[in-house]
Each structure stands twice: as C-alpha cells, then as structure tokens.
Amino acid sequence: MPAIKKKKRKICFVITSKIHYGRSKTILEALKKRADIELQIVVGGSAILPNYGDVLSLMERDGFSWNEKITMSLEGGDPVAMAKTTGIGIVEFTTAFDNLRPDVVVVRGDRFEILAATVAAAYLNIPVAHIEGGDITGSIDESVRHAITKLAHVHFVTNDESKNRVLKMGENPKYIFNYGAPELDFVAQNSFTVTNDYINKIGVGDLVDIEKPYVMVMQHPVTTEFGNNRKHIEETLHAIHELGIPALWFWPNIDAGTDEISKGIRVFRERKKPENIRFIKYVSPEEFIGLLKKTICLVGNSSAGIKECSLLGTPAVNVGIRQQGRMRGNNILDVPHKKEDIKKAIEKQIKNGKYKQQKSYYKKGTGEKIAERLAKMSLYQQKRFHE
C-alpha cells in the first residue's frame, strides 16, 4: 500500500501594519522554509493602506504571498472610528478564517485590529498563538493586550517579567514560551545601510545628510489622551526645531488621535518651514533599522526606543505615557510633554552617546524557535483557568 501522506499543519499569520510585518519577518521566513506546515497570511488594517506603508509590495519583494486581504479601517482618526473598525474586523476576519480553515492563528501585540482577529478565531474554535503578551504599556493598548492573552491558547512572551504576568493571569505554563522578541532577532541577523540619495527622495521638508549626526522622531497618538495629541506633538515639534539638529520625522500610526498629530505636523511645517526636519511617511523594515543604527537619538513614544534601541545601544528619549510601565534599559530617558524637558533630555542623550548593548528582550534564533514550536506542539481548543 502507498504511504499515507502526512497532513501539513495550516498556520495562519495575521499582519495588520508595516511594523508588524517587519517585526515578524524572521518567523515568517522560518515558517516558509518548513515542509511540514502550510503558511497562510491574512493582511488587513493599515498594512493595506498606502499612506501607512505598502506592505503587499514588501511581501511580494520578499517572496511572500497573501491568502486574504481584509478591508476594515474607517477614516476619522478618533475613538469611534477605532471601535467601529474593530467591529468590522471581527466580521471580515471571521469570513477569512472560515474560508482558510487554519489549524492555528498567529497574532502579535496589542492593537485593536489584532483584537478583532483574535475574537474571530476564538469563536471559530481555532487555537490562537499570541506573540508579545504580558507587557505593560500605557493607554488602552495594555487592556487590549491582556484581553488577547485571555483569548489566546499559546503565548510567546519576550521577557521573564511578561512571562510572570501571563502566569498570574491564569494561563497554563506548558503553553508559555519565552523566546525573546522576534524583531531583535531581525536586527541581529542583518546589516542594513541607507543612502542620502534614497532618504532625500522620499518625504517632504529639508534635505538631511545622514552621513552627519541626526535624530529620528516617532511619536504616535495616545488613545486615552484623545483631544490632547495635537498639543503634545507641538511640544516635540518646537523642541526639535529649536535644537536645530537634523531630524528624520516619521508619520504617526493609525490609532485614534492620528488626525490630531497629522494636522499639528502639517500646520507647523507650513508656518515654520523648518530647515532641519525631513518628514517621512514610511520606509521598509530594513531601511528603518539601517537608520536606527546610525541615529544619535530616537525621540518620541515608539517601542523601538525600548526594544530595538536597547540592543543597538541607541539613546532614546521617551515622551509621555504611551510606553508607561514597559520594561526598559538604561538607554531610555523618560520626559513629559514639555518642550524644555524634551530638549534637555535630547542634549543629555547626545552627550552620553552610545550605550552598552542590552539583551533583556533578545534571544538568538527567536524566529526559528517560534516556528518549530508552532509546527510541532499539540494544540487544544477549550481553555481553563490554571490555578
């Protein structure tokens, strides 16, 4: 009799932003190489919106294809749009998962689009694997992250503190794995460079010579501070402008409050015509890391200051509460939304220079380890609170 061909495990990976794609590439590459799994990719949210990064083109460049494309994002940049987008996402992800019939759905982080995918998979009795559970952050994101943890069946945490929190939430220790942050696996495996010609062909504003010292700015909206985000971004804009240091300023993400920040940036740009700032909507994950390796300081409220910068030794000034409570190294200076405090912190970080490499979030081979576990581990549907 002919041998019975073993069924491949169908693993469905959800990508809802350019950042999620870049931070998951080592896992996706490891899954793609395996003969014992069928990789499915569902793309939605800001990942398919041109203003937030052309993820579909990046995937095609990297040799990945998508199985389902989810149109779910409502315009508005406010809490109503974000709540309704989540509802639309549940409907659309349900249809996608029902069509694909995966054995496990993989999600990461704390975003509202990811919550939608998780709810859909859980109600379809599909096991959910969650990357980056247990972190503490500011805003509603932390609540969303913990909600996803309680719906998820498998947990790939990035550090020991987060692992302990997931345990305290009643999750089964047999299904909690601390393999480190996959984005740092991505950083450690590659050497990226960016040229002046490239960076000054994209975006608007002054030309910036990246062969000379420059800062990077990434400041996203804080949902629970809706109505104050414009005032907050203006403090950072004035601080960077008055320092006069060449700066690459990246556009905010799609969270509620993004229109406040975008308007603040546009009005400032038109009125001040700053000669030291170039405003950029997005670059590829590789180009972003290349720039981050060379910058003298990252300013704003991105988790890149806490994670990627910790491994690179890059100084970072963390503004406001968006990353409040997240485990961090000594490369971070925390400041409120006050121009003079921001300026002083940047000057202090530049004077300090590079920090010693820190590996609180880093473990070698994260992508391969997660892929191996996803392919080989036993799966289950019914969750129980683990005492």
Image: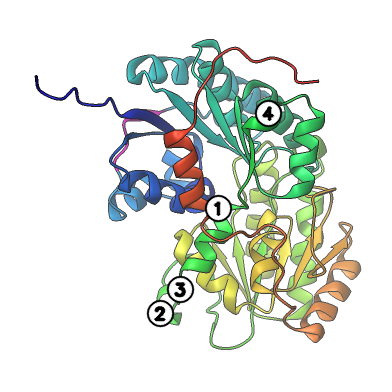
Q: Which residues are magenta?
A: 65-70
Q: Nearer the viewer, mark 3 or mark 1?
A: 1
Q: Nearer the viewer, residue 100 or 66?
A: 100
Colour convention of the picture: rainbow
Q: CA distance from mark 2 to mark 4?
A: 44 Å
User: What type is the residue that disc 4 sits on?
Assistant: Thr
Tell me: residue 64, above or below residue 276.
Answer: above
Residue 86 appears in view: yes
Please state the horizontal and vertical placement of residue 130, each as a whole percent of the image.
59, 34
Q: Nearer the viewer, mark 2 or mark 3?
A: 3
Question: Of label 2 and label 1, which has the lower sequence position?
Answer: 1
Residue 43 appears in view: no
Quadrant of residue 347 in the image?
bottom right
Residue that carries the numbered disc 4 in the rendered image: 149
Residue that carries the numbered disc 2 in the rendered image: 197
Q: CA distance from mark 3 to mark 1?
A: 17 Å
Which mark identifies residue 192? 3
Question: Of label 3 and label 1, which has the lower sequence position?
Answer: 1
**Mark 1 and mark 4 in contact (Cβ < 8 Å)?**
no
Q: Residue at x 69, y 69 (%)?
A: 272
Which mark identifies residue 182? 1
Which quadrant, please, contains the N terminus?
top left
Quadrant of residue 256 in the image?
top right
